[in-house]
Image (cartoon, helix red, strand yellow):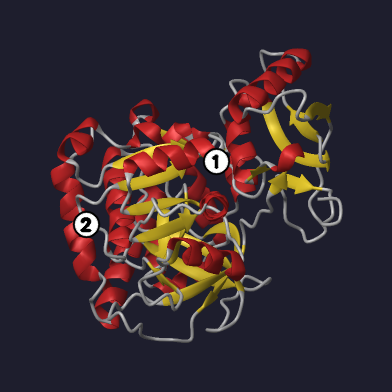
Amino acid sequence: MTNYVRAFYYLRCMMKRAYWDQDKLRDYQNDKLRRIVKYAFENSRFYNEKFKEAGVRPEDVRTVEDLNKLSIVRKSELRTRASQDVVSSEFDMADLMVQRTSGSTGQPLYIYIAGRENEFRKAKHLRAQMALGQKPWDKWVTITSPLHFAETTKLQRMLGLYGVSAVSVFDDLATQVSKIEKLKPDVIDGYSNSLFLLAREVKRRGLETIRPKFLVSGAELIDGNSRKFVEEVFGVPFYDQYACVELERMAWQCKEKDGYHIDVDSVIMQFVDKNGEEVSPGEEGEVVCTSLFNYAMPFVRYALDDIGVPSEKTQCECGRAFPLMKVMEGRKTALLTLPGGRVLAPFAFMLAVWTFKHYGCIDLFRIVQKKKDLLVFRLKVKECDADRSVVEKELLAHMRNVLNISEDEMAFEVDFVDDIPLDKSGKFSIVVSELNQANQ
């Protein structure tokens, strides 16, 4: 059960820290770093081994700069280890919340979260929203997966305090528009491409009934022209936030929109080159994070598979002291056009697979649009209770049901493979369209 007194205490402290001066923030960050490093070494078998391999003791890591003595941890490395090796020995895993991420690799990573950490995460999320002007009683709508529908508690709904009304990303656009019209939201957030599709539908129908104060996106990147289009349709600002399941909100745009403020009071964000060396401000680097609040499952020098740029600016016009960054590459996706003109964001397909009851049988997957009316699910499976014929039959039925795509509208096929290669860029695309613009 969420302790709201504690959550709002966290939030109050966070709001103050955003205006601390750089020296005070740096001292705070270094103190939190020393604590988490010592804790991870003493309570996580995985990190104890990592430190010893690097020849580093906890007392050797006193400041942010000392983190460079440690090697970078990648998701693939965590997946190869049993969860109990990574999770702190001080926690009973049965008492922890479990969330699952897939990111750019198509393979799940299970994240374990303690109750206090979850309250801290909620406070982090609210700080970013409040920085944009969101009020406690504003009507808040999010376009998301049904998996997140229960995240707003009964008490929040009863009091109307930062309660979110969820609209399913799997609903067709007409249904989404109808629900949002009835809710009359002050704030709309969701996956970036979902908000773009919503804006396109609102413009097509010439609607004036959906008028939020602002919109907020995340989970995937869209281009500047698409973002401008959304703002023009709704006549309000469209802000972006940078987050991941492991660390919640990490960076966010304020009203100035001059980059993303990094939550340096809860995460240390480094930008490194191919040799693992930190880049200079204004240069691109891989994003590597150390959480200052994840104790149940620590993340120390954890690579996010994203590319970012630390800003050369030292101060934002908003007055907050948090440093700025830009997100350059990462979770970019393209829209898929179905026969009849229906358009779906790839994230909807990905979420549909993640909610499949036999998802535990899938080691790796890719969804490929071969033709306008043909979608192929390439699966690398592992040993499980269900055989391949069951997985194939039930996956196809599940996808048609969740996405509301009939056999007449589009053909689905399953292709079982031994492996799925990376893209030429070295990234892993979960959803791929082999159609060129002329075919679409």
Which of discs 1 and 2 lies nearer the camera? The answer is 1
Q: What residue sits 58% from the left and 36% below the top?
A: 351
Q: Nearer the viewer, residue 330 or 112?
A: 330
Could you tell me how far apart the alpha carbons at marks 1 and 2 are, in whole angstroms?
Answer: 28 Å
Left or right: 67, with 113 as reference point: right
Of the numbered discs 1 and 2, the one sitting upstream in the chain is: 2
Q: On the rendered image, what quadrant is the N terminus found in?
A: top left
Residue 47 in view: yes
Residue carrying label 1: 173
Left or right: 114, with 394 as reference point: left
Could you tell me which secondary element the residue under label 2 belongs to? loop
Asked if disc 1 and disc 2 are in contact, CB closer than 8 Å, the reply is no
Left or right: 49, with 10 as reference point: right
Dot 1 alpha-carbon crowd within 10 angstroms: few under 14, some 14 to 19, many 20 or more: many
Residue 361 position within the rendered picture, expressed as x and y whole percent measured from the top left? 67, 24
Q: Give residue 238's quadrant in the image.
A: bottom left
User: Relative to 128, does residue 169 appear above or below in the rendering?
Assistant: above
The amino acid type found where label 1 is placed reads: Leu
User: Relative to 360, does residue 222 appear above or below in the rendering?
Assistant: below
Return the mark for residue 135.
2
Q: Nearer the viewer, residue 425 or 341?
A: 341
Residue 376 position within the rendered picture, expressed as x and y whole percent measured from the top left? 80, 34
Left or right: 149, with 271 as reference point: left
Q: Nearer the viewer, residue 437 or 367?
A: 437
Q: Give residue 54's quadrant in the image.
A: bottom right
Q: Give residue 142's quadrant in the image.
A: top left
The amino acid type found where label 2 is placed reads: Lys
Q: What residue sits 17% from the left and 51% below the top?
A: 8
